[in-house]
Image: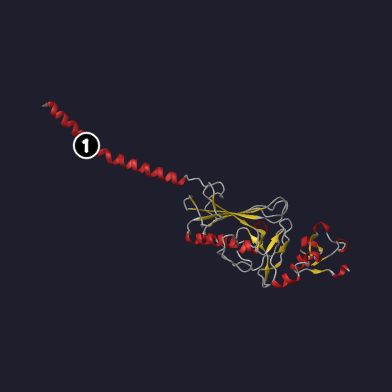
Amino acid sequence: MKNRFFKLFLLWMTALTFVACSPSTQKEKQEGTNTTIAQVEQSQNLPDSLLPFKRSKQLVLGELDSYKRSTQAHIQLRYDDKPTEQRESKINVDPVGWHNFKFPIDYSGKEAWFMNRGHLVGYQFSGLNDELRNLTPMTAYLNTGSMTGTDEKNPVAMLFYEEKLAAWLKQNKNAWLDYRVTPLYTDSELIPRQVELQYAGISANGRLIPIQFNTSIEEVNEDGTTRVILNNDAPNGTLDYQTGLAEATLQSEKQEKTQPESKNKNDRTVYVANEGKATVYWYDKKRMPAKTNQAKVVEMSESQAKAQGKTYAEKEQ
């Protein structure tokens, strides 16, 4: 009998202990679980290819290299960090290798400027217009997606990705965009053959948000960022990446009938001062003004000079 009462007493004491301790223990376990989850969320490491996450707008521009070429532009910003001032209509500085030409864009003879002074990070993000470290010569086709005007639906152009990223920022106003643009040169060539874009989003608590626009040329890097490489070329011309000079590849029907054979025979070599920026050209270097810096004289064909609006220097005669 005594043993029976003793066993009942032990069961009663055990139940009291369980009731007293159980809620606290469960609460501690639950709190411990929550703390662990929070620590995991805050300790997510962002890729080294992004700028350090400081929760403030950052714009880092690479210095010009030994050839005076721009090297890289990298920005991190939120929607509210976009510039509000309207961009000036004209860029007032020339990146190295800059020349421009009016080339036919179809067989009707309609012409448009072949090149643009292209921003690496677009003005709608950077707010920079005349910064040489953020400029490089681009074909109009690479920059705007069209040989004339703009085509923001063309996925082989800078404008397509800038507009898509701007729309992403607008839809994710509490997140950050990390966007890097790198011109890709070959050896000492002044004009990049390609331009590399890299982009990703960052949440308010510092976690990576992959961004993709489902184009055939996007690649996802191992670190979760997206990479795109765009070609600096155009359907209506060929570009000399060493000098920045170019030749038209389209001719009007009238030109095709009258000029195809005579062009190569009669297209003389001419010389242009001031790295090819002078408004006149010369047939003979020796007849150029004595003060001419010969190291900055550029050689081109007469048709190229005329395409840039240059005229023959009559004083040479």
Q: Which residue is mark 1?
A: 16
Locate residue 100, reporting x and y percent.
71, 65
125 w.r.t. 252: above or below? above
How many labels sit on residues? Answer: 1
Q: Is residue 253 above or below residue 277?
A: below
Q: Nearer the viewer, residue 219 or 118?
A: 219
Q: Quadrant of residue 241?
A: bottom right
- Residue 135 lies, in percent from the top left, at 66, 59
- Tell me the quadrant of the picture where the C terminus can be found: bottom right
Q: Quadrant of residue 56?
A: bottom right
**Is 142 displayed left or right of 27 in the figure?**
right
Question: Where does the N terminus fall, quadrant-wise?
Answer: top left
Color encoding of the figure: secondary structure
Please state which amino acid type lies under the numbered disc 1. Answer: Leu
Comparing 130 with 28, the one in front is 130
Instruction: Between residue 49 and residue 52, name the one nearer to us.
Output: 49
283 sits left or right of 226 in the view: right
**Residue shown at 57% from the left, 48% from the top:** 49
Label 1 neighbour load within 10 Å: few <14, some 14-19, many 20+: few
As helix, strand or loop, the secondary structure at mark 1 comes to: helix
Q: x, y percentage for residue 146?
A: 61, 66
Residue at the spot 60% in from the left edge and 58% down from the top edge: 121
Residue 220: give x, y in percent of width and height.
53, 50
The residue at the point 16 percent across, 28 percent down is 6
